[in-house]
Amino acid sequence: MIKLRYSKKLFRRSSSKSSTSSDGGDAGSGRGEIEWEVRPGGMLVQKRDGRGHVEVITVRVATGFSWHDVSIGATCTFGELKVVLSMVTGLEPREQRLLFRGKEREDSDHLHMVGVRDKDKVLLLEDPALKDLKLRAALAAQAVQSPYQPFIKV
């Protein structure tokens, strides 16, 4: 955390209320300090107040012919979105590929850093390599169930 001193003339509030109002901010308290924090993307911004309010967005996830509306925190990652989608669709997170604005996104990418906002659409695809492995495993299991083929059909 970084604290910087500032001149009250630079950061004066432009409202009709007087600066002696008890709104809980540092501008009226006379301390003259701003607390700063570094966001996940490396940007230095003024520290949020301790309300703990997390913005929740609704993401529309299209899966082929169907779609799901999923509510998730705006600062979550695509990996966390995959975990939520695994409960809805039944696909494991490693079997999912998420595309936003035409690009596949990594599990470590944050939704807000990529630009996902409320009511945005994300495309969910099943990983073709894992889909092929599942199909081959199902065919092999089917062949094991009936190892004997009749030579004469009646």
Image (cartoon, rainbow, N blue to C red):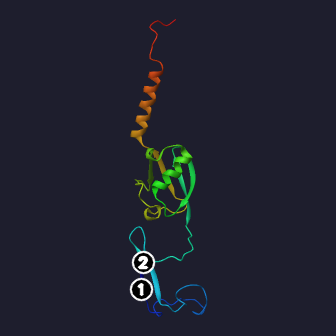
Q: Nearer the viewer, residue 43 or 31?
A: 31
Question: Type of residue at label 2?
Answer: Met
Q: Where residue 133 appears, x then y in whole percent?
A: 40, 35
Q: Relative to residue 14, is residue 51 depicted above or below?
A: above
Where is 107 relative to 148, above or below?
A: below
Residue 78: give its label: none
Mark 2 nearby-residue class (10 Å; few <14, some 14–19, many ≥20): few
Using the numbered discs, state the Cα–Cα distance from disc 1 to disc 2 in whole angstroms.
10 Å
Residue bearing the label numbered 2? 1
Q: Secondary structure at mark 2?
A: loop
Q: Residue furthest front?
A: 1
Q: Residue at x 43, y 64 (%)?
A: 113
**Residue that appears at 47% across and 61% down:** 111
Q: Residue at x 39, y 39 (%)?
A: 129
Asked if residue 66 shows in the view, the reply is no
- Looking at the picture, does residue 55 appear above or below residue 9? above
Indicate which label's residue lies in the foreground, 1 or 2.
Answer: 2
Rendered location of residue 84, percent (x, y)? 53, 52
Query: In the image, residue 15 lies at what x, y percent?
Result: 57, 89
Mark 1 and 2 residues: CB-CB less than 8 Å, in contact? no
Place of residue 28 in the rendered image (x, y in percent of width and height, measured from the top left)? 55, 90
Q: Which residue is mark 1?
A: 4
Specify the quadrant of the image occupied by residue 139: top left
Depth order, front residue of 92/123 = 92
The number of callouts visible is 2
Classed neighbour count for the residue bearing mark 1: other residues with Cα under 10 Å, few (<14), some (14–19), many (≥20): few
Image quadrant holding the N terminus, namely bottom left
Identified by mark 1, the residue type is Leu
**Residue 74 visible to an observer of this rendering:** yes
Q: Dot 1 lies on which element?
A: strand
